[in-house]
Protein backbone atom coordinates (compact mmCIF):
# COMPACT_ATOMS: atom_id res chain seq x y z
CA UNK A 1 0.00 0.00 0.00
CA UNK A 2 1.44 3.36 -1.05
CA UNK A 3 1.52 5.92 1.72
CA UNK A 4 0.87 9.62 1.33
CA UNK A 5 4.08 11.64 1.25
CA UNK A 6 4.91 14.75 3.23
CA UNK A 7 8.02 16.68 2.34
CA UNK A 8 9.81 18.67 5.03
CA UNK A 9 12.64 20.88 3.81
CA UNK A 10 14.83 22.00 6.69
CA UNK A 11 15.52 19.53 9.49
CA UNK A 12 15.90 22.10 12.27
CA UNK A 13 13.64 22.59 15.27
CA UNK A 14 10.53 23.77 13.45
CA UNK A 15 10.91 21.25 10.62
CA UNK A 16 11.27 18.36 13.04
CA UNK A 17 8.30 19.51 15.13
CA UNK A 18 6.08 19.67 12.04
CA UNK A 19 7.35 16.31 10.79
CA UNK A 20 6.49 14.69 14.14
CA UNK A 21 3.02 16.14 14.20
CA UNK A 22 2.15 15.52 10.54
CA UNK A 23 4.14 12.48 9.51
CA UNK A 24 3.00 9.44 11.45
CA UNK A 25 1.49 6.84 9.12
CA UNK A 26 2.87 8.66 6.10
CA UNK A 27 6.22 8.69 4.31
CA UNK A 28 8.29 11.66 5.40
CA UNK A 29 10.77 12.89 2.83
CA UNK A 30 13.11 14.91 5.00
CA UNK A 31 15.63 17.23 3.38
CA UNK A 32 18.37 19.58 4.53
CA UNK A 33 21.59 20.98 3.11
CA UNK A 34 23.60 19.83 6.17
CA UNK A 35 24.20 16.08 6.02
CA UNK A 36 24.90 15.76 9.76
CA UNK A 37 21.74 17.63 10.77
CA UNK A 38 19.73 15.60 8.27
CA UNK A 39 21.10 12.23 9.39
CA UNK A 40 20.48 12.92 13.06
CA UNK A 41 16.94 14.20 12.51
CA UNK A 42 16.06 11.23 10.28
CA UNK A 43 17.49 8.78 12.82
CA UNK A 44 15.59 10.40 15.69
CA UNK A 45 12.30 10.20 13.80
CA UNK A 46 12.97 6.66 12.59
CA UNK A 47 13.78 5.46 16.09
CA UNK A 48 10.24 6.21 17.28
CA UNK A 49 8.43 4.63 14.36
CA UNK A 50 8.23 7.21 11.60
CA UNK A 51 8.85 6.14 7.99
CA UNK A 52 11.59 8.55 6.90
CA UNK A 53 13.48 8.96 3.66
CA UNK A 54 16.34 11.46 3.83
CA UNK A 55 17.75 13.43 0.90
CA UNK A 56 20.30 16.22 0.90
CA UNK A 57 19.15 19.37 -0.84
CA UNK A 58 20.47 22.84 -1.53
CA UNK A 59 17.43 25.04 -2.15
CA UNK A 60 19.57 27.45 -4.18
CA UNK A 61 20.11 24.71 -6.79
CA UNK A 62 17.11 24.20 -9.04
CA UNK A 63 18.48 20.82 -10.09
CA UNK A 64 18.66 19.67 -6.48
CA UNK A 65 15.14 20.91 -5.71
CA UNK A 66 13.78 19.29 -8.87
CA UNK A 67 15.45 16.00 -7.90
CA UNK A 68 13.81 16.24 -4.48
CA UNK A 69 10.39 16.87 -6.03
CA UNK A 70 10.85 13.92 -8.39
CA UNK A 71 11.88 11.69 -5.48
CA UNK A 72 8.79 12.76 -3.57
CA UNK A 73 6.49 11.99 -6.48
CA UNK A 74 8.10 8.57 -6.93
CA UNK A 75 7.40 7.70 -3.28
CA UNK A 76 3.65 8.33 -3.50
CA UNK A 77 1.03 11.08 -3.63
CA UNK A 78 2.68 14.32 -2.48
CA UNK A 79 0.09 15.65 -0.05
CA UNK A 80 2.04 18.14 2.04
CA UNK A 81 5.14 20.25 1.37
CA UNK A 82 6.65 22.27 4.19
CA UNK A 83 9.61 24.56 3.52
CA UNK A 84 11.45 25.74 6.64
CA UNK A 85 14.84 26.41 5.03
CA UNK A 86 16.40 29.79 5.67
CA UNK A 87 19.29 31.85 6.98
CA UNK A 88 19.08 34.54 9.65
CA UNK A 89 20.60 38.03 9.22
CA UNK A 90 23.55 37.12 11.41
CA UNK A 91 24.46 33.91 9.60
CA UNK A 92 25.48 35.01 6.12
CA UNK A 93 26.19 38.01 3.84
CA UNK A 94 23.46 39.84 1.95
CA UNK A 95 23.88 37.84 -1.25
CA UNK A 96 23.54 34.48 0.51
CA UNK A 97 20.51 35.55 2.56
CA UNK A 98 18.73 36.60 -0.63
CA UNK A 99 19.84 33.46 -2.45
CA UNK A 100 18.56 31.05 0.22
CA UNK A 101 15.61 32.87 1.77
CA UNK A 102 14.19 34.49 -1.37
CA UNK A 103 15.37 32.64 -4.49
CA UNK A 104 15.43 29.22 -2.82
CA UNK A 105 11.89 29.63 -1.55
CA UNK A 106 10.68 30.62 -5.01
CA UNK A 107 12.32 27.57 -6.56
CA UNK A 108 10.66 25.27 -4.03
CA UNK A 109 7.27 26.80 -4.86
CA UNK A 110 7.85 26.35 -8.58
CA UNK A 111 9.18 22.79 -8.54
CA UNK A 112 6.78 21.36 -5.99
CA UNK A 113 3.88 23.13 -7.66
CA UNK A 114 4.44 20.61 -10.48
CA UNK A 115 4.05 17.53 -8.27
CA UNK A 116 1.67 18.46 -5.45
CA UNK A 117 -1.32 16.12 -5.50
CA UNK A 118 -4.94 17.27 -5.78
CA UNK A 119 -6.15 18.01 -2.26
CA UNK A 120 -2.59 18.68 -1.15
CA UNK A 121 -1.25 21.65 0.77
CA UNK A 122 1.98 23.60 0.99
CA UNK A 123 3.39 25.76 3.72
CA UNK A 124 6.37 28.08 3.90
CA UNK A 125 7.80 29.07 7.25
CA UNK A 126 8.67 32.72 6.73
CA UNK A 127 9.25 35.22 9.56
CA UNK A 128 7.68 38.12 11.40
CA UNK A 129 10.45 40.14 9.73
CA UNK A 130 8.28 40.21 6.62
CA UNK A 131 5.81 42.35 8.59
CA UNK A 132 8.35 44.78 10.01
CA UNK A 133 8.92 46.91 6.95
CA UNK A 134 6.51 49.14 5.09
CA UNK A 135 5.20 47.81 1.77
CA UNK A 136 7.62 48.21 -1.10
CA UNK A 137 6.64 50.19 -4.20
CA UNK A 138 3.81 48.44 -6.01
CA UNK A 139 5.92 47.66 -9.08
CA UNK A 140 8.63 46.05 -6.93
CA UNK A 141 6.11 43.94 -5.04
CA UNK A 142 4.55 42.78 -8.30
CA UNK A 143 7.95 41.68 -9.60
CA UNK A 144 8.83 39.88 -6.36
CA UNK A 145 5.52 38.05 -6.54
CA UNK A 146 5.42 37.11 -10.21
CA UNK A 147 8.88 37.21 -11.83
CA UNK A 148 10.24 33.77 -12.73
CA UNK A 149 12.46 32.56 -9.90
CA UNK A 150 15.58 32.55 -12.06
CA UNK A 151 15.12 36.28 -12.74
CA UNK A 152 14.55 37.34 -9.13
CA UNK A 153 18.09 38.08 -7.99
CA UNK A 154 18.64 40.41 -10.96
CA UNK A 155 15.69 42.66 -10.04
CA UNK A 156 16.65 46.32 -9.41
CA UNK A 157 14.97 46.23 -5.99
CA UNK A 158 17.43 43.55 -4.83
CA UNK A 159 20.67 45.24 -5.84
CA UNK A 160 23.26 46.60 -3.42
CA UNK A 161 22.00 50.19 -3.53
CA UNK A 162 18.57 49.01 -2.33
CA UNK A 163 19.74 46.32 0.13
CA UNK A 164 22.37 47.95 2.38
CA UNK A 165 22.73 45.20 5.00
CA UNK A 166 21.68 41.69 5.97
CA UNK A 167 18.75 42.82 8.10
CA UNK A 168 17.14 44.62 5.17
CA UNK A 169 17.92 41.60 2.97
CA UNK A 170 16.18 39.33 5.46
CA UNK A 171 13.11 41.56 5.78
CA UNK A 172 12.76 41.91 2.01
CA UNK A 173 13.21 38.16 1.52
CA UNK A 174 10.53 37.36 4.07
CA UNK A 175 8.13 39.90 2.60
CA UNK A 176 8.80 38.32 -0.79
CA UNK A 177 7.97 34.89 0.68
CA UNK A 178 4.48 36.13 1.51
CA UNK A 179 3.99 37.84 -1.86
CA UNK A 180 5.27 34.78 -3.68
CA UNK A 181 3.07 32.43 -1.70
CA UNK A 182 -0.01 34.48 -2.59
CA UNK A 183 0.88 34.37 -6.27
CA UNK A 184 1.59 30.64 -6.11
CA UNK A 185 -1.80 30.02 -4.48
CA UNK A 186 -3.29 30.67 -7.91
CA UNK A 187 -1.03 28.18 -9.68
CA UNK A 188 -1.32 25.52 -6.99
CA UNK A 189 -5.07 26.02 -7.07
CA UNK A 190 -5.12 24.85 -10.68
CA UNK A 191 -3.97 21.46 -9.33
CA UNK A 192 -6.59 21.50 -6.57
CA UNK A 193 -3.98 22.29 -3.92
CA UNK A 194 -3.56 25.07 -1.36
CA UNK A 195 -0.53 26.97 -0.10
CA UNK A 196 -0.09 29.25 2.91
CA UNK A 197 2.61 30.78 5.09
CA UNK A 198 3.44 31.08 8.76
CA UNK A 199 5.49 34.04 9.98
CA UNK A 200 6.94 33.06 13.36
CA UNK A 201 8.50 35.36 15.89
CA UNK A 202 11.27 34.23 18.22
CA UNK A 203 11.04 30.45 18.40
CA UNK A 204 13.33 28.49 20.72
CA UNK A 205 15.56 26.74 18.18
CA UNK A 206 19.32 26.51 17.61
CA UNK A 207 18.99 29.34 15.06
CA UNK A 208 17.36 31.59 17.66
CA UNK A 209 20.04 30.67 20.18
CA UNK A 210 22.67 31.71 17.62
CA UNK A 211 21.01 35.11 17.29
CA UNK A 212 20.43 35.58 21.02
CA UNK A 213 24.10 34.88 21.70
CA UNK A 214 25.32 37.23 18.96
CA UNK A 215 26.01 40.94 19.08
CA UNK A 216 22.36 41.61 18.15
CA UNK A 217 21.00 39.42 20.93
CA UNK A 218 19.88 42.48 22.87
CA UNK A 219 17.49 43.40 20.08
CA UNK A 220 15.81 40.01 20.35
CA UNK A 221 15.52 40.25 24.12
CA UNK A 222 13.98 43.73 23.78
CA UNK A 223 11.38 42.31 21.40
CA UNK A 224 10.40 39.66 23.94
CA UNK A 225 10.24 42.21 26.75
CA UNK A 226 8.07 44.64 24.77
CA UNK A 227 5.65 42.06 23.40
CA UNK A 228 2.34 41.44 25.16
CA UNK A 229 3.15 37.74 25.60
CA UNK A 230 6.61 38.53 27.07
CA UNK A 231 8.00 35.16 26.03
CA UNK A 232 9.46 33.10 23.23
CA UNK A 233 7.72 29.99 21.93
CA UNK A 234 8.72 26.36 21.39
CA UNK A 235 8.64 24.87 17.86
CA UNK A 236 5.62 22.78 18.85
CA UNK A 237 3.42 25.89 18.87
CA UNK A 238 4.31 26.51 15.23
CA UNK A 239 3.65 22.84 14.45
CA UNK A 240 0.14 23.08 15.95
CA UNK A 241 -0.70 26.01 13.66
CA UNK A 242 0.91 24.22 10.71
CA UNK A 243 -1.25 21.17 11.37
CA UNK A 244 -4.37 23.30 11.03
CA UNK A 245 -3.25 25.06 7.85
CA UNK A 246 -2.17 21.80 6.22
CA UNK A 247 -5.30 19.89 7.24
CA UNK A 248 -8.88 19.57 6.01
CA UNK A 249 -10.32 22.10 8.46
CA UNK A 250 -8.39 24.80 6.57
CA UNK A 251 -9.83 23.81 3.20
CA UNK A 252 -11.03 27.37 2.52
CA UNK A 253 -7.68 28.94 3.45
CA UNK A 254 -5.12 29.51 0.74
CA UNK A 255 -2.87 32.47 -0.04
CA UNK A 256 -2.85 33.45 3.64
CA UNK A 257 -0.08 34.25 6.11
CA UNK A 258 -0.40 33.54 9.83
CA UNK A 259 1.69 35.74 12.13
CA UNK A 260 2.77 33.85 15.26
CA UNK A 261 5.00 36.29 17.11
CA UNK A 262 3.60 36.80 20.60
CA UNK A 263 2.65 40.32 19.62
CA UNK A 264 6.07 41.69 18.60
CA UNK A 265 4.67 43.35 15.47
CA UNK A 266 1.76 44.72 17.53
CA UNK A 267 4.33 46.24 19.91
CA UNK A 268 6.10 47.87 16.95
CA UNK A 269 2.83 49.31 15.65
CA UNK A 270 2.15 50.66 19.14
CA UNK A 271 5.52 52.40 19.25
CA UNK A 272 6.94 50.13 21.95
CA UNK A 273 9.73 49.02 19.65
CA UNK A 274 11.61 50.80 16.86
CA UNK A 275 10.82 49.72 13.34
CA UNK A 276 14.05 48.42 11.76
CA UNK A 277 15.12 49.80 8.47
Image: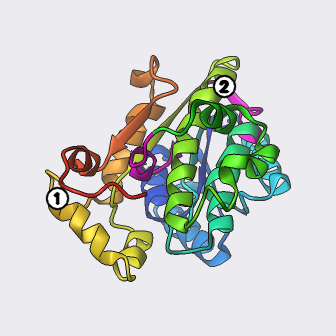
Residue 93 coordinates in the image, percent (x, y): 62, 73
| Residue 110 is at least partly visible in this image | yes
Residue positioned 14% across, 51% down in the render: 228
Residue positioned 45% across, 22% down in the render: 253
Q: Nearer the viewer, mark 1 or mark 2?
A: 1
Q: Residues within 10 Å of mark 2 (few under 14, many from 20)?
A: many
Q: Residue furthest right?
A: 63
Q: Is residue 71 left or right of residue 15?
A: right
- Quick one: quadrant of the C terminus? bottom left
Instruction: Write the start and end of the magenta stretch as one range.
Output: 111-134
Question: Which of 143/148 is in front?
Answer: 143
Q: Which residue is mark 1?
A: 226
Q: Is residue 236 left or right of residue 161?
A: left
Question: Which of 40/222 is in front?
Answer: 222
Q: Is residue 38 magenta?
A: no
Q: Which residue is mark 2?
A: 188
Question: Which of 231/26 is in front?
Answer: 231
Amino acid sequence: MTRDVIVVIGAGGIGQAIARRQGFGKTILLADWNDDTLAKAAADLGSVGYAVVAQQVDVTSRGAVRALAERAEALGPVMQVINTAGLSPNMAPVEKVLEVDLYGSAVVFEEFGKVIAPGGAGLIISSMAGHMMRPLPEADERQLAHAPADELLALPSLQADAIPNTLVAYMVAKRANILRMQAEAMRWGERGARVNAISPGIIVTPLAAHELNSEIGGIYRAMVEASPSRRMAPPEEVAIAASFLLGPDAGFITGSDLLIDGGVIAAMRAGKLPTPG
